[in-house]
Amino acid sequence: MKPFIDLRIQYENIRDEILECINEILESSNYILGKNVKAFEEEVKSYLGVVDAVGVASGTDALHLALRALDIGRGDEVITTPFTFFATVEAILYVGAKPVFVDIEEETYNIDPEKIEEKITPRTKAIIPVHIFGAPSDMIKINEIAHKYGLKVVEDAAQAFGARIGSKKVGSFGDIGCFSFYPSKNLGCFGDGGMVVTNDLKIAEKIRILRNHGSAGRYVHETVGLNSRLDEIQAGILRVKMKYIDEYNEKRRKKAALYNRFLSDGVKTPVEKDNTYHVYHLYSIRSIFRDKIKETLSNHGIPSVVYYPIPMHLQKAVRFLGYKEGDFPVAESVAKEILSLPIYPELPDEEVYEISQIILRCLKDS
Ligand SMILES: *Cc1c(COP(=O)(O)O)cnc(C)c1O
């Protein structure tokens, strides 16, 4: 079986730069909150066009700390999508708040803004849209609703570094934007890492204190925080990769366009809404023949993955919320039909062609 994402080719292309950077950090023996974290925060800040950026230990922590910084907790409700990675929901539960789900759009698989208002109650404090697979959520409509009801917006941009609406990058629309640098993300390090971005200096300051044991100065603790720092080696690696992120995203888009060309008559291919720049962290097709396509690909040594087979409202871990099958028909049917195909910047075009041909042949026999 080939790898679903071949991270090795990318490493080989930038190996000298990476090794030089890691070596320099090892020689300096400065591993925590040093010059690379600071420099990477500055680089992300100017790339995204935000006022501040704070490196943290993971995307999950970024979401958790974002909600802490907004003082969201027990008794509060947070609206989000049932079609996401579980971390979005965990973050809401960590602070003691209640996740309230809203079904997704057929087109983008992102939260449907038209269905948000009916879920708002006096306890609603925030909305967490997720830019799933790298496709921007409708931030214009979501911000309008948030403004109307006085809600905070925390963007889960873990899968969407560099995605944008017009020229404005995701993560910069909400009160807070959260990123993950998990190795397979479209900007990934060689371990865990995350980032919180915001246009509010007070929020940034709170996150800086929370990520470091609630401490602004040495051994003086204002609040109970976390140990959640982005480490120097990961920040150094990310600074190298950051130089290529636009090139990587462009290449992902080219692979996606090629898949679209071959596959759009046979399956539902990803939709790019007008004026949006999708970064294809994942390339996901939708078909009622999903399971058969997956098996056929596997028989040809091609891996494919179902992101995500069980929508959040039907997860055992949140059974206490009382949701049931049928509550979110779009998310539920997408979960039964979605399939992600290999995509990464270095994926050879011939493989895109081969994978597509296998799928088309499989559909002909269906
Ligand atoms: C990966 C991911 C996270 C969590 O990020 P980690 O860095 O793995 O903690 C959160 N939300 C979404 C949508 C993700 O894809």
Image (spheres, grey):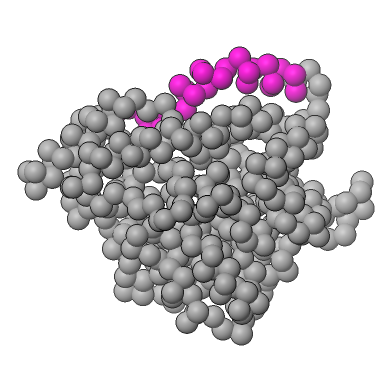
Vertical side of 296 occupied by 80: above or below: below
| Closer-to-camera residue (118/26) | 118
Q: Estimate the x, y position of residue 359 in percent, counting from the top left.
A: 19, 39
The part of the chain drawn in magenta is 1-25
**Quadrant in the picture for the N terminus:** top left
Does 85 lie within the magenta span? no
Q: Estimate the x, y position of residue 41 in percent, counting from the top left.
A: 73, 41
Q: Estimate the x, y position of residue 108 in percent, counting from the top left.
A: 39, 57
Say whether residue 210 is visible. Answer: no
* Residue at figure coordinates x 71%, y 63% from the top left: 68
User: What is the tally of numbered marks visible in this picture?
Assistant: 0
Q: Estimate the x, y position of residue 295 in percent, counting from the top left.
A: 20, 41
| Closer-to-camera residue (82/241) | 241
The secondary structure that most of the magenta stretch takes on is helix
Say whether residue 346 is visible. Answer: yes
* Residue at figure coordinates x 91%, y 49% from the top left: 217
Vertical side of 80 occupied by 194: above or below: above
The answer to whether 139 appears left or right of 258 in the picture is: right
The answer to whether 204 appears left or right of 130 in the picture is: right
| Closer-to-camera residue (144/224) | 144
- Give the farthest residue toward the left: 365
Vertical side of 11 occupied by 353: above or below: below
The answer to whether 265 appears left or right of 286 in the picture is: left
Does 11 lie within the magenta span? yes
* Residue at figure coordinates x 76%, y 35% from the top left: 39
The answer to whether 166 appears left or right of 352 in the picture is: right
* Residue at figure coordinates x 22%, y 42% from the top left: 263
| Closer-to-camera residue (337/96) | 337
